[in-house]
Image (cartoon, helix red, strand yellow):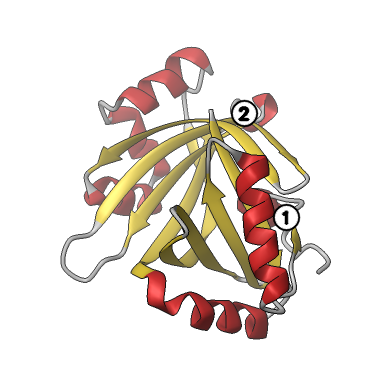
Amino acid sequence: MEVELKFRLPNKSAHEKLLSLLSPFHITTLYQHNEFVDGSAYELSSQRAVLLLRLYEQPRIPQCVVCLKAKPMLADGVSRIEMECEESDPEIFKACLDDPQTLMHEDLRVLRKVKEEFGVETFVGLGGFRNVRNVFMWEGVKLEVDEAKYDFGEMYEVECETSEPETVKKMIEEFFKENGIDYSYSVMSKFAVFRAGELPPS
């Protein structure tokens, strides 16, 4: 079970202001290409699950992660989701873009679970989006400031994985308020926004 805090930033101005404030704590910037996959009969989505392939488009060493996400819950800025991930060859990601059915022939633990437990026999691609993630180590917690780039617009979000959501949420909110950062609690996951085909109201 992954527990994350999710804050929505209203616009690019708030996003840039936050990046500036956090710049002394910057660790890295990740360029992510996210693609979602389901079964041809929507075996995953009908059971509140989705298969995510994420390619880290780093200049020298691209990396790929395959994740099964299931049973998401998001309330008051706290996200809880069952998640199982496995690193894979970036060539798998590229092959999946051309033909998602190639995943049927890959020997990955996550894919075996999708096929055996969810009964997927044929994979179909749902599409995806790109994301620029700036990572900061601030006050002992890792903050991930995202710029999600959809075909229909851009969304700005701050995520923080934590085992103490209420304590850390209060700390982050105080930081936002002290520095005049407008924010709200995220009400939809990035995948839900992608599937909706439009940005949620600010």
Counting residues from the N terminus, which is met first, the one under dot 2 or under dot 1?
2
Q: Residues within 10 Å of mark 2 (few under 14, many from 20)?
A: some
Q: Is residue 117 visible?
A: yes
Seen in the picture, residue 129 relative to 52 is either above or below; the reply is below
Q: Residue at x 43, y 37 (%)?
A: 67
x and y, in percent, of residue 20 in the image: 50, 83
Q: Residue at x 23, y 59 (%)?
A: 62
**Which residue type carries mark 1?**
Ser
x and y, in percent, of residue 60 in the image: 16, 67
Circle 2 or circle 1, nearest the eye: 1
Q: Which mark is residue 186?
A: 1
Q: CA distance from mark 2 to mark 1?
A: 29 Å
x and y, in percent, of residue 161 in the image: 51, 45
**Which residue type carries mark 2?**
Ala
Left or right of residue 25: residue 197: right
Q: Residues within 10 Å of mark 1 (few under 14, many from 20)?
A: many
Secondary structure of the residue carrying numbered label 2: loop
Seen in the picture, residue 135 relative to 72 is either above or below; the reply is below
Secondary structure of the residue carrying numbered label 1: loop
Left or right of residue 31: residue 5: right
- Residue closest to the far top: 116
Q: Which mark is residue 5?
A: none
Q: Which mark is residue 41?
A: 2
